Every structure is written in C-alpha cells, then in structure tokens.
Image (cartoon, grey):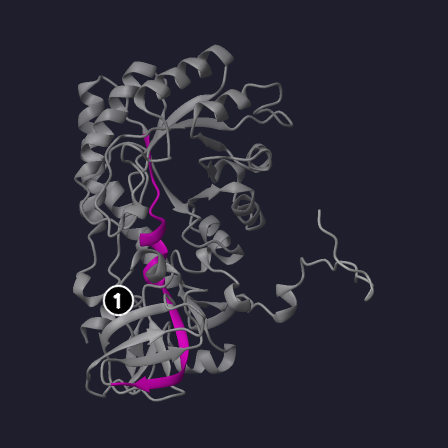
Amino acid sequence: MKRLALFPDTARIVDQALVIGGLRLDSLADEFGTPLYVYDRATMDASVSAYRQALKTYYPGKAQITYAGKAFLCKAVAEWIRQSDLWADCTGAGEIEIAHNGKIPREAIVVHGVNKSSTDILAAREHAGTLVVDNLTELHGLADPGGTQRDGHSPDIWLRLLPGVAVTTHHSHTQTGQHGSKFGMTPDELVEAAQFCREMGLPLSGLHFHQGSNFRDPAPLISATQLAVDLVKEIDLGSEWHFCPGGGWSIAYHEDELPQPDVETYVRLIAETVVERCKANSLPLPVLHLEPGRSLIARAGVALYRVGVVKRRADRTWLLVDGGMADNPRHALYGAKYSCLPASGLDRRMEGPVSIAGPFCESGDVLIEDLPMPKIEEGELIAIPASGAYQLSMSSNYNGARRPAVVWLDRGGAQLAVRRETNEDLSRRDHSIPDRPANQEATET
C-alpha cells in the first residue's frame, strides 16, 4: 500500500490494522483517548543517522546537526535531543526553558528570533551557548553594560544574513530568504554588524541564514552559500568559524509527493558548495551546522482522530472528527495537503473521495480535502501521517479546545509524554473581576 510509506519507519499492517512501534493504533486510542499524537522514536533516530552518514560522506570538516525546536518541542523531545547529541535551535525564552528542563547543555543551545525581548536575551545569557543576532538594533543592545555577560558567561554570536533568494515552497508564508523578508540583515548591514562586534569586543564566531521551510529543490542554496562564504572572507571570523545554511528540507505529506525527498542529495549539495567556496576564498572549512527540524520529526508523528459524524451528500462526503485546526492549523494557514488511513479494516477497497474536517466554528476547519478512502462509519478511528512537525507547536485553544495528549513510542512501549489539557487548564491563568452592584449603571468614559 503506497500510502503506508508516509507513516513512520516501524508502521506495519497486522490483521488489517495499523501498527506502529509494535503497537496497534486503535489500542493506543482506547488507552489514551483522542485526538492523540504518537511519536515513533525509531523513525527519529533513523533520520538523525541518515544526516550523520551523509555529512560523514560528503563533508571533510567538523559538522553538527541542530534540531529546530519550533517544529515541536516538549520535555521528551528535549531529552531525546540531548541523548542524540544534537544541538537545539530555540526561539524565545519559552523554548529555551523547555530545552533547559530537558537538560540540554548550554553549549548545545542556539537562540534565534527576529525581535527578541529582554526576557529572551536574559534566558539566552543564562542557558545558551550561541545567540544568532537578527538585526543591528539587537546587536547594539548587546553592547550595553552586561548585554551579553552574566556570571562570567558570554554566548557566542552568529549574524543572520538575508541572502536575497528564497527556496521554492508550497506557500509564500514559508519562504524566509527573499528580498523584503522580515528576517536577517542585508550584506551591507552584516558587514556593519561585524565591524561593530570587533569594535565592542563581542564574541562573533559564525554566520547563519535560512531560505524557507518544506522545500525539495536545494539549488537556491548554492548562490546563498556562495554569498555567505564570500562575506566571511570580508569580515574575517578567524580560523574556527561556524556556518549554518538553515534547514527546511521537506518530507512527503501525501502519496502524490512520494518518494520521500533524499537527504543525501540535500547534504551533498551544501557540503560541496561550502568546500568549493572556502577553497576559492582561501578560507578554512567552518563547523557546518544543519537545522533539519521538520525532516527529523515530521514523519515520526501520527495524529489519531475519532469520526463523530459522517455526512454523505451528492457533492461531497464529510468525515467530521474530534480534532482539527486547533491542533493542526497547517491546512487552514498554508493549504497543506495530507493523506490518511483508517486504523483498522485496511482490506476494504477505496471508494470516492472524502473531506475530513473538525468540530470548530470555522469553514476553514478542514484537515483533508477530496481524498480517496474506504467507506468510513461513525465511531471509526483514522490516522493522519506526517503529523510530527508544525502542528502541536502551532496549536491553540480555539473554541475552548484542549490540546491533545502526546505518546512516545520506543522499544515496543508507549509512554505519555504530554498529558491532555483539561478544562481547568483553560482557566488557570484567568482572574476574576469584581461584580458590579445590580443598581449601578455603566458610565461612559
């Protein structure tokens, strides 16, 4: 079954039921409820191994893999990052706190952000080894007394370049490297920033850029990497410098996108371009950092939903499930395309297309449109693959939705990683306002 290739590495069909990590999905739903997100560690480990092998094969210098926390970060994922000897890319104090709680060492935490608050900067000073500076205003603030120093620690500084070229993605909102983007510094600004670092004695050691998320053609990385390395020749980062061309390498979300994008092709192009351009500029090879957040974890995650209502109409069949845009806004935001399988009864033949939507009061609360499926009845369980990234990390409490539970699958066992939110959680931060006396009229101000 072609659609099975979208699921985690350990996905199997046993007795016409979906099994991941040796466990039946319908049994997991019975135990933990729905909506439910399951993460298969074996798939995540295999993805890391693929990147490590490609770097070993094609890059002769030092290299590091950095997990992008914005894809999805919780304490269990942070602990996996530490156990896997990865770095963690954190945006803001919240993600830094999760990484710290997962005991990721300071030197393995790198902090991003286009408009870092004073709280973000303080958290970076306390817990991070590297701070990626997005703009001159931020950089000037770091030069204030105590700007980067705290208890004798000064995070290394990388500068974020706006290369002026984006990769091709499925939606303009996932492009970040083009002219007009809110991210990073132009080459002229970056040269000015490097000069400022030298004048103020700030510990500048690296260069970073990012061109977009969920792309399949790595060709635009060539010109951006060439520009970045040429700038390093001009600003002089020393004999051991760090270079990160971002991440964003895609995975297949739908059977029309198979086969899965090849990690080796992506890594080889970056590595060869860096080596060639460093040689042309008589520069030492940098420590090469890759940030493959989505392609490390997206395919490891599966979302499970229970069908509550089936509406069979002349123009469309709707499967209405117990989750939707509150836990996965990607279709509503980007028109993202997904696939699906029933959790059991997989020997049924495919019938006409169905659309799958959630319970929320928005016409945009749709997960999947016009996907061939077997005849599905009310009460059945469905499984949506490639649900591990940019879903729960962008989830909300819209309509009072409570965020789903997350279950970690490893070595044949299932462990609760994130408990399901409760009604009490929804009002935990609320404060009451005083009652107005019944005979007191409102006054205009």
Q: Amino acid at mark 1?
A: Leu
Residue 147 in percent (x, y) is at 58, 23
Judging depth in this view, the residue of 153 and 194 nearest the camera is 194
Q: Is residue 401 visible?
A: no
64 lies left or right of 397: left
Count of numbered circles in the view: 1
209 lies left or right of 271: right
Which residue is painted at 26% across and 56% down in the image? 251
Q: Is residue 426 visible?
A: yes
Name the quadrant of the N terminus.
bottom left
Question: Helix, strand or loop at disc 1?
Answer: helix
Residue 301 in percent (x, y) is at 38, 64
Residue 290 in percent (x, y) is at 33, 40
Judging depth in this view, the residue of 412 and 419 nearest the camera is 419
- Image height of 395 relative to 13, above or below: above
**Quadrant location of residue 204?**
top left
- Image height of 174 relative to 6, above or below: above
202 lies left or right of 261: right
Residue 308 magenta-drawn?
Answer: yes
Crowd band around label 1 with a 10 angstrom C-alpha radius: few (<14), some (14–19), many (20+): many
Q: Which residues are magenta?
A: 287-313
Which residue is painted at 53% across and 38% down in the image? 106
- Residue marked by disc 1: 6
Which residue is painted at 24% across and 30% down in the image? 225
Judging depth in this view, the residue of 291 and 399 nearest the camera is 399
